[in-house]
Image (cartoon, rainbow, N blue to C red):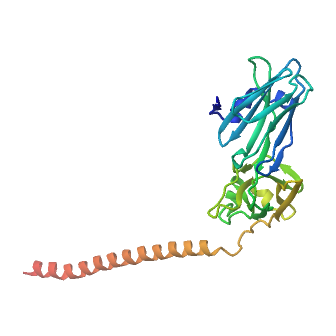
Amino acid sequence: MILIFLSIHLNNILVSGLSLSEQVHQTPADMFKQPGEEAKFNCFHTISNYDKILWYKQTNEQLQFLGYMNINNGYPENGAGVKIEGGAEKDQNCTLTIERLKLSSSAVYFCAARLHNREAYFGGGTKLTVLGKDDKITPPTVKVLEPSEKECRNKVEKEKRKKTLLCVISRFYPDHVNVTWKINNEEMSKGVATDNMPAQPNDGEFYKITSRLKVDANKWFDPENEFKCIASFFNGTGTTYHENGTRGIEAPKTGQNITTEAYLKRSQTAKLSYGVLIIKGCVYGAFVMFLVWKLPGSSGKRNN
């Protein structure tokens, strides 16, 4: 059995083929199965002269080569447990079939179109989860946390700094979730940072993922603006959407009551200044007493 493992990030493979990769189409995007069942993935491309379709299984950061279709002939890797059928030329459909699924079959499967030794252009991938008998499909809970009060505390900082909203998507299973942000129903891409993949916290039963949206402070300090985090979740039959959001606030006004933290900070500064003044007063008093004590003694010496 020969298995080819490519220790390379998929993003690095795609760099040279961003435009033509849009002409490689793969379905479905998500799939749930039970152990012992079979899974089928479809792939076709619209790139002239390309006549090969390659198939890969991605787990974590590794790609396992499963085999390829050359024109109308399929060549699965020995021991991969797959069938490759169909055609690999333009507009032809190529099918990868995995028989007798196991829990370890859970992964993301990719097809790629290729011509001889030229670049391979990848499809969008299919995320497959093989569910255990006790696994329960659970949609996510979404919560948006407002920016910290420490950001943009005064006007100068407000003009230079930004506000960060945090979205926590938690308690979902399995991990078929995508996250998007909207401001006033307009989808945002700039300023969005989402975890690379969902994680399983301590209990290991559900998944959790976080996403951050960084915006200019003047957007946050506007009650007319609505910030919304949306989690799209595949439940086995379709995609459901779960969201949570918040609105901007009024900008802090000059002369408004200071926060507790600022009050404590000012109080500590005042106490320090008061302590320094007391020490200076003590030193000055000691110096005056020394002069008062010294002068009469000096006068007596001169009279003698």
Label tally: 0
Is the residue 15 above or below the residue 30 in the image?
above
* Residue 15 screen position, x and y as percent: 73, 30
Is the residue 235 above or below the residue 51 in the image?
below
Is the residue 22 above or below the residue 279 in the image?
above
Let me know if residue 300 appears in the view.
yes
**The one of 101 and 291 positioned closer to us in this rendering:** 101
Is residue 44 left or right of 211 when viewed as pictured?
Answer: right
**The one of 275 and 82 positioned closer to us in this rendering:** 82
**The one of 247 and 219 positioned closer to us in this rendering:** 247
When asked about the image quadrant of residue 244, the answer is bottom right
| Quadrant in which the C terminus is drawn | bottom left
Is residue 209 left or right of 301 when viewed as pictured?
Answer: right
When asked about the image quadrant of residue 140, the answer is bottom right
| Quadrant in which the N terminus is drawn | top right
Q: Residue at x 70, y 53 (%)?
A: 198
* Residue 214 screen position, x and y as percent: 73, 53
* Residue 288 screen position, x and y as percent: 29, 79
* Residue 91 screen position, x and y as percent: 93, 26
Residue projecting furthest to the right:
91
Is residue 267 left or right of 79 when viewed as pictured?
Answer: left
Let me know if residue 226 appears in the view.
no
When asked about the image quadrant of residue 212, the answer is bottom right
Q: Residue at x 75, y 49 (%)?
A: 191
